[in-house]
Image: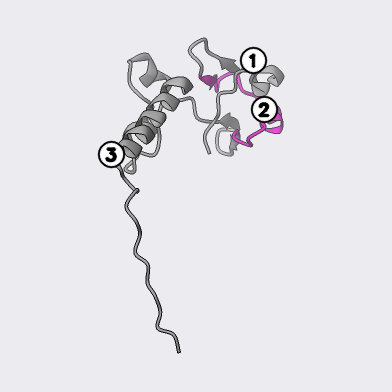
Amino acid sequence: MNCRHCERSPCVMVCPSKALTKLESGPVIIETMKCIGCRLCAMVCPFGILELDTLSKVMRKCDLCVHRLNEGKAPACVTTCPARALMYDEFDVIMRRAKEKAAKAIISGVGSQPGVVISLPEN
């Protein structure tokens, strides 16, 4: 499961060292040099996303590949997903694309053909 980058991120609100920040562009990031590993962010995360890196003793989570976003690229998980199951865009844009795809399927008749009915001989 990936971070949902909540609009009002409880993890950001409770972090005593201000290691978590919500960027104006949307991603919630962790500045690991500030993190004290207290795990308060993990306790308040409604999705149970944040985890303690046991080697470095700091919290870890998805940052949406903010370095890639700054270059105008999609997050790595989106570009490398072999099934193309992941998308990155504004919610309204994704929903519009999904509705257009569904409408095209309906118009083209995909899935509208009658199925095969198998009748079993009566004994």
Mark 3 = which residue?
Answer: 108
- Of residues 103 and 48, the one drawn nearer to the viewer in this rendering: 103
Marks 2/3 in contact by CB < 8 Å: the verdict is no
Q: Residue at left 51%, top 16%? A: 26
Cα separation between marks 3 and 1:
53 Å
**Taking the image as drawn, is residue 60 in sight?**
yes
Q: Position of residue 95 (x, y in %)?
A: 45, 27
Q: Residue at left 30%, top 43%? A: 109
Cα separation between marks 1 and 2:
11 Å
In the rendered view, does 17 fall on the left or right side of 28? right
Tell me which amino acid carries mark 1. Lys
Observer-side mark, 1 or 2, equals: 2
41 in relation to 72, above or below = below
Tell me which amino acid carries mark 3. Ser
Earlier along the polypeptide chain: callout 1 or callout 2? 1
Mark 2 = which residue?
Answer: 41
Earlier along the polypeptide chain: callout 3 or callout 1? 1
Number of the label disc, if any, that sits on residue 47? none
Mark 1 = which residue?
Answer: 18
Q: Residue farthest to the front?
A: 122
User: In terms of image quadrants, where is residue 53?
Assistant: top right
Q: Position of residue 65 (x, y in %)?
A: 42, 24
Magenta residues, start to end? 27-50
